[in-house]
Image (spheres, rainbow, N blue to C red):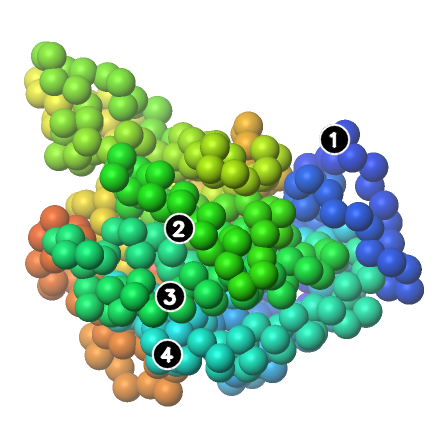
C-alpha cells in the first residue's frame, strides 16, 4: 500500500475536551499524561495489517483503521517473517503523527505458561520461566519505549497487558468444573501475578505509556462469584513487583472476543411470564448481557477496591458487530424466556463461552474515542482477519497448540457448557491471516460498511 495513503490515514478519534492538546516534537519532553490518551489523538495504522486488509476484496473500506500490534513472542520485538518490529512501528507512528498526539496500541502477551485454559494461544515460555519473561521480553520492550526518540515525542503508547491471564486464576482453578491443571499451576506459582505486576511497573514508569489490564468479558466474569474476585486479583497484580494502582490507566474488555457491545432487545431486568431473563439458558444468571454495561460496572468495581476514580476502559469491538441477515430487528416472542432472549439477541454464537473464529461474526463499531461514560475508546485491538487458532493441528515453532474449540466438529467442554464450538473451518494458526474470516467480518459488519 502506498506510504502516502498510510501516512494520511491514521484515524483521528474525537476532539479533546477539557485537556489542552500539546503538540510535541521529538526534541522536546513528552507531554504530561492525560486522563484519556485517545482524546484529541490520532491512532496509529499498522502498515502490515493495512496492506493485508487492502489486498482483500472490499478490504479498502477498513484498511485505514487502527489496530493493535501483538508482541506475542520475544522474536516479535525485532520483527519476524518480514513483519515490522517494535522500533519500525514506532518510527512509522512518528511519521504518521506529524508532531500531533498519536496513540500506538501494543498487546504485551508472552507470560510464562500463557493462556492456561486454551491451547491455541499457548506461548513460548514454560510456567516457571518468569525471569526470562522479565529480562528477555519486558525489559527489551521497556528499553525501546524509553529511548528519547519515542519517550520524548508526541506518541502515546497504550499497552494491553496479558490478555486472558488474570481472569483464568479466578475461573479456571481450584476444583471448579472449568479448572485446568495448567491454571492451577499458574495460580500456585504466582507467575501470572508477578509477570503482570512487573510489566505494569516497568512500562508504567515511562512517561507516555498507558497500561490497560485485560479483564475478560461479560460472558466470563459477569457472574457474582467471578466479578469481585477478578477485581481483587487485578488489584493484587497491580501492586506486585513494585507496581502501584497509579500505573494502571484502565482495563480492556472483550479483547479478541465476540460479545456484543450493546443488546438493545432485552435487559437483565426483563421477565417473561414471571421468569427473569437471568434464568434464560443464554444469560444463565449472569448480571450482564453485553460489554458496555459490563465494562462500566467492572471499571467501577476496580475503583471500589482501590484504583483511582479516573481509570478508564477500552472495549475491543473488532468482531462483535453481529450484523448481516441474521441480526434480529426486534425482541423475540414472549412465549417463554428462552424464545424471548434467543429471538432478540444480536450475539448469534451458540454459547457465550465460544471464542474461536466464530461463524457469522461481523466487524463492530469503528474505533472511537470517549464513546460512553467511563469508556476511553472503542478499539480494534484484535486485528480483523487474524485467526484465533487453527482448526486442526499444525506443527509450528511459535509454541501454539491445537485447541478443539477451534475445530468446527468439536462438541464442547464445561467452559462452553458442552455446546458445539461454532468455529469456522480451515483456519490457520492464531495470529496468521485468515481470508475467509476477514470476508465474513466484512459481510456481517454492524454498523454496515
The quadrant where residue 401 appears: bottom left
Is residue 81 visible in this depiction of the protein? yes
Q: CA distance from mark 4 to mark 3?
A: 10 Å
Q: Around disc 4, counting alpha carbons within 10 Å, would you say few (fewer than 14), some (14 to 19), or many (20 or more)?
A: some
- What label does residue 90 carry, if any? none
Circle nearer the viewer, 1 or 2: 2
Q: The residue tagged with tag 4: helix, strand or loop?
A: loop
| Residue behind mark 4 | 128
| Residue behind mark 2 | 233
The image shows residue 67 at horizontal and vertical percentages of: 55, 57
Circle nearer the viewer, 1 or 4: 4
* 21 to the left or right of 163: right
Q: CA distance from mark 2 to mark 4?
A: 20 Å
Q: The residue tagged with tag 3: helix, strand or loop?
A: loop
Work out whether mark 4 precedes mark 3 in sequence or the reverse, and give the earlier one. Answer: 4
Residue plotted at (23% across, 49% down): 353
Question: Closest to the observer: 292 or 390?
Answer: 292
Quadrant assignment for the N terminus: bottom right
Q: CA distance from mark 2 to mark 3?
A: 11 Å
Work out whether mark 1 precedes mark 2 in sequence or the reverse, and give the earlier one. Answer: 1
Which residue extends farthest right? 27
Amino acid at each position: 500500500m502506498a506510504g502516502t495513503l498510510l501516512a494520511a490515514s491514521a484515524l483521528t478519534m474525537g476532539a479533546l475536551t477539557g485537556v489542552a492538546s500539546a503538540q510535541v516534537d521529538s526534541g522536546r519532553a513528552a507531554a504530561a499524561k492525560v486522563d484519556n490518551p485517545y482524546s484529541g489523538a490520532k491512532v496509529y495504522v499498522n502498515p502490515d495489517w493495512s496492506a493485508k486488509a487492502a489486498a482483500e476484496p472490499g478490504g479498502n473500506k477498513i484498511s485505514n483503521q487502527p489496530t493493535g500490534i501483538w508482541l506475542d513472542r520475544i522474536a516479535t520485538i525485532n520483527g519476524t517473517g518480514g513483519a515490522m518490529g517494535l522500533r519500525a512501528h514506532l518510527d512509522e507512528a512518528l511519521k504518521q503523527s506529524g508532531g500531533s498526539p498519536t496513540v500506538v496500541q501494543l498487546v504485551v502477551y508472552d507470560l510464562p505458561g500463557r493462556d492456561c485454559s486454551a491451547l491455541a494461544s499457548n506461548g513460548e515460555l514454560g510456567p516457571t520461566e518468569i525471569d526470562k519473561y522479565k529480562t528477555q521480553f519486558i525489559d527489551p520492550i521497556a528499553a525501546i519505549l524509553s529511548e528519547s526518540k519515542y519517550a520524548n515525542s508526541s506518541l502515546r503508547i497504550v499497552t494491553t497487558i496479558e490478555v486472558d491471564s488474570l481472569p483464568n486464576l479466578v475461573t479456571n482453578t481450584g476444583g471448579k468444573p472449568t479448572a485446568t491443571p495448567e491454571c492451577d499451576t499458574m495460580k500456585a506459582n504466582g507467575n501470572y501475578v508477578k509477570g503482570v505486576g512487573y510489566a505494569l511497573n516497568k512500562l508504567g514508569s515511562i512517561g507516555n505509556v498507558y497500561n490497560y489490564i485485560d479483564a475478560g468479558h461479560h460472558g466470563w466474569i459477569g457472574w457474582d462469584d467471578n466479578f469481585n474476585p477478578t477485581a481483587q486479583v487485578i488489584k493484587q497484580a497491580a501492586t506486585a513487583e513494585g507496581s502501584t494502582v497509579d500505573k494502571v490507566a484502565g482495563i480492556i474488555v472483550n479483547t479478541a472476543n465476540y460479545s456484543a457491545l450493546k443488546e438493545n432487545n432485552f435487559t437483565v431486568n426483563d421477565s417473561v411470564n414471571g421468569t427473569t431473563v437471568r434464568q434464560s439458558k443464554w444469560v444463565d444468571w449472569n448480571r450482564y448481557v453485553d460489554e458496555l454495561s459490563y465494562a462500566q460496572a467492572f471499571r467501577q468495581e476496580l475503583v471500589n477496591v482501590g484504583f483511582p476514580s479516573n481509570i478508564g476502559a477500552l472495549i475491543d469491538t473488532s468482531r462483535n458487530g453481529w450484523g448481516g441477515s441474521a441480526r434480529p430487528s426486534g425482541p423475540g416472542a414472549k412465549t417463554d424466556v428462552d424464545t424471548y432472549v434467543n429471538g432478540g439477541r444480536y450475539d448469534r454464537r451458540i454459547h457465550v463461552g465460544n471464542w474461536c473464529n466464530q461463524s457469522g461474526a461481523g466487524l463492530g463499531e469503528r474505533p472511537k474515542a470517549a464513546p460512553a461514560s467511563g469508556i476511553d475508546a472503542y478499539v480494534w485491538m484484535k486485528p480483523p482477519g487474524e485467526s484465533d487458532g487453527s482448526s486442526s493441528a499444525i506443527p509450528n515453532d511459535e509454541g501454539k497448540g491445537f485447541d478443539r474449540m477451534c475445530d468446527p466438529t468439536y462438541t464442547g467442554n464445561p467452559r462452553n457448557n458442552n455446546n458445539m464450538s461454532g468455529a469456522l473451518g480451515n483456519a490457520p494458526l492464531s495470529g496468521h491471516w485468515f481470508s475467509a474470516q476477514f470476508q465474513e467480518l466484512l459481510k456481517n459488519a454492524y454498523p454496515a460498511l
